[in-house]
């Protein structure tokens, strides 16, 4: 890729990702209407995650869409959950890897466990970075998009997209086939965490106790001297990284910390049930909205664009909350990991 890509190309990539996710959303909705009972069946177990039948539906839709719609002028490598280990997928189909200019990482359905039981929206996630081969990193992503895959009783689906350094594009589609309408979203401007939502990810039993101890220690340090007569911080376990980013972007949550890789490493446990690069590939959208996202102990998120590397992260709704929480969060994590 040239050292400086023309803004029109980046804008075209943004629009392509949105079109792709519209197709995924509509495909999932149509399949649910016909085959909802089979969504929760296990289709495969990979190094990255458990693949359910609903995932297979979206993966087939993606490959077909890329084959039909991806421009020949923007040769791309596709990285996503469900692609066989070691398999290289490029578009136009068969393009040699060294001839690709872009690397696109996808999570077709982030929040599979939510949507397959019709409990809560899932999200389709995608990010594109210049192609640097195996060195391509999360921090290289320059375009991202995420689209809501709503439950059966929802009429509205939200969509967010951005080019790095540009504005956040936010829209809502109220019915399939209708033109989207622009919406305005912004993260919380709160100056503290009292009486708001802020969560430490602990979806599964492994590591839950240590994570809760770290969380309790952080809030104890931040709220010393409080009498505890009412709940100070509310917790919400949204089993979708994309969904968590949405909660931060739209002002619902003030902090979300996913420290599962650090906790499991401390406990000597191995598990694929952590955040991976394809789960957090839309991080730049939170930044475009005005929030912050970083590694729990500081610095940018640093991971190759693959489906297996564990990623720990923390998102803040605004810079003030980040400055307030960072010292306690980092100190407690270091002490708990020693």
Image (cartoon, helix red, strand yellow):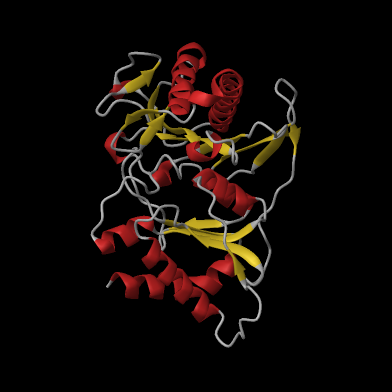
Give the camera-side residue of 313 and 29.
Answer: 29
Across and down, in percent, residue 225 comes to 58, 88
Kindly identify the residue that appears in the image at 45 percent across and 40 percent down. 141
The answer to whether residue 201 is above or below residue 17 is below
Residue at 34% x, 47% y is 303
Q: Quadrant for residue 229, please give it.
A: bottom right
The mark tally for this picture is 0
Q: Quadrant of the N terminus?
A: top left
Is residue 145 among what the camera can see?
no
Res 202 visible: yes
Q: Quadrant of residue 278?
A: top left
Above or below: residue 61 compared with residue 320: above
Q: What residue is shown at x 39% (from left), y 75% (from top)?
A: 331
Who is closer to the viewer here, 219 or 316? 219
Residue 72's spot in the image, x, y percent? Answer: 45, 14
- Can you name the residue that lies furthest to the front here? 37
- Where 285 sits versus 205, above or below? above
Closer to us: 305 or 213: 213
Front residue of this view, candidates 69 and 220: 220
For the C terminus, the quadrant is: bottom left
Task: Say left or right for 65 vs 155.
Answer: left
Relative to residue 195, is residue 280 depicted above or below?
Answer: above
**242 left or right of 203 in image:** right
Q: Position of residue 42 (x, y in %)?
A: 38, 29
Q: Residue at x 57, y 31 (%)?
A: 14
**Residue 300 location, quadrant:** bottom left
Residue 322 percent across, percent down from the top left: 54, 67
Which residue is the extreme one toward the bottom? 225
């Amino acid at each position: 890729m040239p050292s400086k890509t023309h803004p029109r190309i980046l804008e075209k990539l943004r629009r392509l990702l949105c079109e792709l996710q519209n197709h995924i959303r509509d495909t999932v909705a149509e399949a649910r209407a016909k085959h909802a009972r089979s969504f929760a069946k296990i289709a495969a177990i990979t190094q990255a995650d458990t693949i359910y039948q609903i995932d297979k539906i979206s993966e087939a839709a993606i490959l077909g869409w890329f084959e039909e719609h991806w421009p020949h002028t923007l040769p791309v490598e596709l990285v996503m959950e469900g692609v066989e280990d070691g398999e290289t997928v490029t578009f136009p189909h068969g393009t040699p890897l060294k001839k690709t200019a872009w690397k696109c990482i996808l999570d077709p359905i982030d929040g599979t466990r939510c949507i397959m039981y019709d409990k809560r929206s899932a999200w389709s996630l995608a990010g594109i970075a210049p192609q640097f081969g195996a060195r391509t990193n999360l921090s290289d992503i320059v375009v991202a998009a995420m689209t809501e895959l709503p439950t059966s009783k929802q009429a509205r689906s939200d969509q967010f997209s951005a080019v790095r350094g540009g504005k956040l594009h936010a829209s809502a589609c109220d019915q399939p086939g209708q033109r989207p309408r622009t919406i305005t979203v912004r993260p919380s401007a709160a100056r503290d965490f009292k009486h708001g939502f802020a969560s430490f990810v602990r979806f599964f039993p492994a590591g839950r106790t240590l994570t809760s101890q770290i969380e309790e220690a952080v809030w104890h340090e931040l709220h010393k001297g409080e009498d505890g007569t009412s709940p100070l911080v509310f917790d919400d376990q949204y089993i979708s990284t994309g969904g968590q980013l949405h909660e931060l972007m739209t002002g619902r949550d003030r902090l979300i910390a996913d420290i599962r890789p650090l906790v499991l490493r401390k406990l000597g446990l191995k598990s694929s049930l952590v955040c991976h690069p394809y789960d957090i590939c839309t991080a730049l959208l939170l930044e475009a909205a005005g929030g912050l996202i970083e590694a729990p102990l500081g610095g940018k998120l640093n991971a190759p664009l693959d489906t297996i590397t564990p990623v720990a992260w923390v998102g803040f709704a605004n810079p003030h909350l980040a400055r307030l929480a960072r010292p306690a969060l980092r100190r407690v994590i270091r002490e708990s990991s020693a």
